[in-house]
């Protein structure tokens, strides 16, 4: 067996290839950017060929960088931007049109029509999701309705649908495998999260033919082998797949119910493993499949804060009070507290559990004594307080408190923010040694499928921590902070 796993992390703005060894060490990493296309306001597209080219170039570059020969690769794992959707010709593999990206809002009117038909509760119950342009189902319908001749070609059996994971496996296998995994399928509005199969009634409401859909498979198994490529030899197992946030949850070794992770990027994504039964949210969170290993499926609750690192970017680019994002920690730490300043970073509305698209940012508690340092500290507190609200909603939905909270993403490097998060959640916050948790999750899933690792316990022992933050804030001060936060939320 080869000594390494090749992980492909296909993201919204770039594709990254990583070589990972048995100790979960990253031997090499190469990232290739690709173009974003904005044909109209609110529309976001990718050219699938540009995505494919970026993946090829990233793989070639990381093998050249590391000197790893393909014979040393035990398996390939894939993780991907989740809801981005595309259609292609089954015989030629040529895309029928540009992919519609998860951020694209062009199907807002169709989502509104479905809601007006009283279908939102049906979709929520069957899929765990809300009717929103974010998800894949309405994107597929749009492509079928608006790309000339596509419905007719579909009726003739010429067209295949996939999210990016499906497209990459198709290309890597030379068109031999048309598959997705349960985690990606659970983000389409088309899969029943109880049966783990495409739901015919929902497909009828979306007007999407079942014949174009891929087979839904577990997150860790050999789907196919590489075939007919000019940058990899034939015969390398393609053996693990998960959507990016679920892959990060797995990569953080959150294998048990009650373990959760938060990825702090432009926004913040919080997922908590809820075990082998889906938990319906009463607080506007999403119920999603985390992964499937063999016959066992794990589910998760997911919530996101629209603005996290973007609030720091606003201080840098909009107000100019810091020159680089990394400066905020030192500035915020120069004062003992925020001096009564509260910043609700609702710059693009509020997500769960508030769900107010019309909300706008609020800075409250300003006095003559307020300084840039107080605003910087209030910004970090605002990020941490949003996550506190998400965790509180998840705890209420689960009927149990979170007991492990792991962090990753760019802003997780900010020690002050992580300490604030631990103080507000009253649980330890654990930062891993490697923040490439998304790619690690894909590698782990692929490695398990081919016996590179024997099981989850071996991986758990290999996973390593960088730092553990424990609660230190006085309870009275915490409650006062939460009270002021709720007051400020009411002003958004």
Image: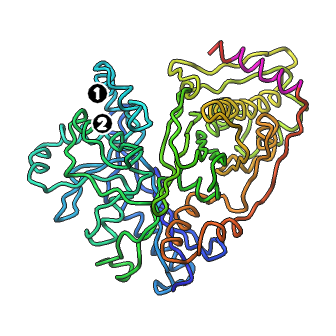
Whether the magenta-drawn stretch holds residue 486 is answered as yes
**Tag 2 secondary structure:** helix
User: Which segment did they paint magenta?
Assistant: 476-488
The answer to whether the residues at label 2 and label 1 have Cβ atoms under 8 Å apart is: yes
Q: Is residue 24 left or right of residue 336?
A: left
Image colouring: rainbow
In terms of image quadrants, where is residue 309?
top right
Q: Residue at x 37, y 69 (%)?
A: 223
Q: Residue at x 18, y 58 (%)?
A: 89
* Percent position of residue 56, x then y: 40, 69
Tell which of 155 and 311 is nearer to you.
155
In terms of image quadrants, where is residue 167?
bottom left
* Percent position of residue 145, x then y: 18, 37
Considering only vertical position in the picture, is 409 above or below 224?
above
Category of crowding for the residue at label 2, using alpha-carbon neighbours closer than 10 angstroms: few (below 14), some (14–19), many (at least 20)? many
Q: Residue at x 30, y 58 (%)?
A: 215
Q: Which mark is residue 391?
A: none
- Residue occupied by mark 1: 110
């Amino acid at each position: 067996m080869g000594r390494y796993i090749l992980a492909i992390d296909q993201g919204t703005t770039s594709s990254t290839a990583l070589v990972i060894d048995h100790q979960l060490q990253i031997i090499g990493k190469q990232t290739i950017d690709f173009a974003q296309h904005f044909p109209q306001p609110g529309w976001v597209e990718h050219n699938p060929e540009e995505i494919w080219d970026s993946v090829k170039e990233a793989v070639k570059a990381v093998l050249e960088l590391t000197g790893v020969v393909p014979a040393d690769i035990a398996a390939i794992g894939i993780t991907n931007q989740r809801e981005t959707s595309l259609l292609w010709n089954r015989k030629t593999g040529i895309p029928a049109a540009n992919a519609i990206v998860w951020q694209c809002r062009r199907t807002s009117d169709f989502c509104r029509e479905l809601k007006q038909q009283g279908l939102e509760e049906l979709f929520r119950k069957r899929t765990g999701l809300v009717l929103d342009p974010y998800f894949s189902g309405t994107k597929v319908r749009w492509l079928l309705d608006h790309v000339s001749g596509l419905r007719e070609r579909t009726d003739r059996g010429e067209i295949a649908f996939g999210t990016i994971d499906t497209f990459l496996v198709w290309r890597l296998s030379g068109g031999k495998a048309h598959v997705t995994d349960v985690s990606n399928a659970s983000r389409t509005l088309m899969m029943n999260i109880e049966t783990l199969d495409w739901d015919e009634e929902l497909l009828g409401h979306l007007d999407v033919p079942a014949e174009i859909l891929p087979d839904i498979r577990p997150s860790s198994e050999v789907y196919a082998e590489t075939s007919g490529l000019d940058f990899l030899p034939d015969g390398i197992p393609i053996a693990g797949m998960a959507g990016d946030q679920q892959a990060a949850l797995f990569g953080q070794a959150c294998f048990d119910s009650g373990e959760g992770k938060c990825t702090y990027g432009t926004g913040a994504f919080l997922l908590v493993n809820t075990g082998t039964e889906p938990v319906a949210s009463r607080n506007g969170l999403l119920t999603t499949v985390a992964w499937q290993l063999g016959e066992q499926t794990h589910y998760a609750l997911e919530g996101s804060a629209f603005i996290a690192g973007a609030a720091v970017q606003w201080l840098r680019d909009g107000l100019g009070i810091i020159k680089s994002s990394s400066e905020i920690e030192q500035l915020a730490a120069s004062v003992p507290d925020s001096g009564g300043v509260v910043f609700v970073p609702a710059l693009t509305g509020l997500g769960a559990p508030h769900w107010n698209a019309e909300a706008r940012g609020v800075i409250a508690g300003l006095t003559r004594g307020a300084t840039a340092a107080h605003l910087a500290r209030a910004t970090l507190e605002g990020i941490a307080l949003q996550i506190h609200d998400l965790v509180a909603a998840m705890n209420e939905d689960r009927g149990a408190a979170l007991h492990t909270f792991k962090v990753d993403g760019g802003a997780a490097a900010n020690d002050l923010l992580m300490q604030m998060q631990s103080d507000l959640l009253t649980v330890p916050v654990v930062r891993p040694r490697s923040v490439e948790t998304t790619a690690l999750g894909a590698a782990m899933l692929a490695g398990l499928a081919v016996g590179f690792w024997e099981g989850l316990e071996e991986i758990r022992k290999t996973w390593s921590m960088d730092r553990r933050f424990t609660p230190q804030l006085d309870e009275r001060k915490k409650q006062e902070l939460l009270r002021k936060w709720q007051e400020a939320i009411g002003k958004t």
